[in-house]
Amino acid sequence: MIYDTLIVGQVCLDTNADYDGSVSRGFGGAVLFSGHAAAAMGSRVAVLPKRNPATLDLEQAFAGRENITVFPLDSSRSTLMENTYFTADRERRACRCAESIDPYRPDELPGIGARVFHLAGLVRGDIGGDMIEACARRGAVALDVQCMLRERRADGAMEFRDWAEKRAYLPLIRFLKTDAAEAEILTGLTDREKAARTLCGWGAREVMITHNEQVLVCDGEAVYAEPLKPRNLSGRTGRGDTCFAGYLAGRLREDIPGALLRAAALVSLKMETPGPFRGSRADVENYIARFYRN
């Protein structure tokens, strides 16, 4: 069987402290939000999550999505994340990584076919250049760049640092996803359009940059953008992961404008409810009809 996408990244255990003092705990990680989103949009999805099986139940994490195939990997530790949000829009936050998984190795890739290999780690060291190279030999590579920039310190606090090897590896990336802050770290540019064009110029073929009001994509020639239109932000966590996975699902079937429109609507709808997206493609199409075409 050929999967549409194989998503490589850990499910983690999240503790979220909100700006109003409330605290919630549950599953997190880019692979979780991305897997549910891609499956909801109709993709045949495989995920390669690494965790300590004594502390994290993958069956529970991916429950309810029949078109997600899980290839579990064991690790001496699961990733434990602590997120503190300081504002109602959840744009200002502090992240702490109490524990992290053992790094992924190329020999852990399953012997399956996939049209896109989506690399979705959480911190630097989860996924190395050897994984990018191994995946590029087997299909198109999509990279969420946070796992190349977000560095875990000895005390668990995290800070963002530039990716020293970016110019060597960006030419291997078919789809690159950053947020506005990450794009500035990579390029030194605050203008998102200019940053996207720069990253394309360094070799990435399609670059997505997410922002709290808009998502844009550059293919090296044109820049496309769609606004985000959530009615509330209770499900802000996982925004970028959902948007990128929705876009990748769309690009396997349609052009950039169509895929971007559905990704923007998908993530807008997802942000209205905490946790991974539990709806359907029909829900997204209805959201488009109601909020994007009137």
Image: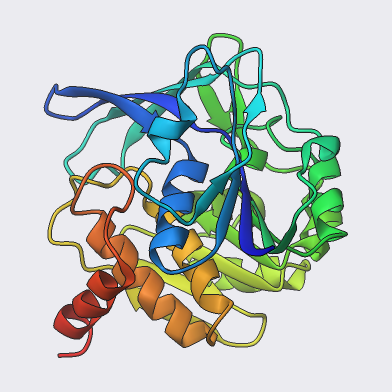
Q: Among all residues in the image, which is located at the extreme bottom? A: 294
Could you say which is closer to the camera, residue 165 or residue 235?
235
Say left or right for 279 vs 173.
Answer: left
Q: In which quadrant of the rendered view does residue 5 lie?
A: bottom right
Is residue 203 toward the left or the right of residue 280 in the image? right
- Give the image's coloring scheme: rainbow
Closer to us: 203 or 294: 294
Give the mark count.
0
Quadrant containing the C terminus is bottom left
Q: What is the x, y in percent for residue 24?
A: 23, 24
The correct choice, above or below, for 123 with respect to 64 in the image is above
x 83%, y 60%: residue: 138
Is residue 149 visible in the rendered image? The answer is: yes
**Residue 219 spot, x, y in % from top left:** 63, 80
Q: Decide if residue 213 is in sight here.
A: no
The residue lying toward the viewer, choosing from 232 and 68, is 68
**Picture residue at 25% right of the left edge, 54% below the top:** 271
Residue placed most toward the observer, 78 or 62: 62
Which quadrant does the N terminus fall into?
A: bottom right
Tell me which corner region of the image, top left, top right, bottom left or bottom right, holds residue 90.
Answer: top left
Q: Position of residue 276 (x, y in %)?
A: 33, 47
Residue plotted at (71% across, 68% down):
174
Q: Position of residue 215 (x, y in %)?
A: 41, 68
Residue at x-position 27% and y-position 79%: 285
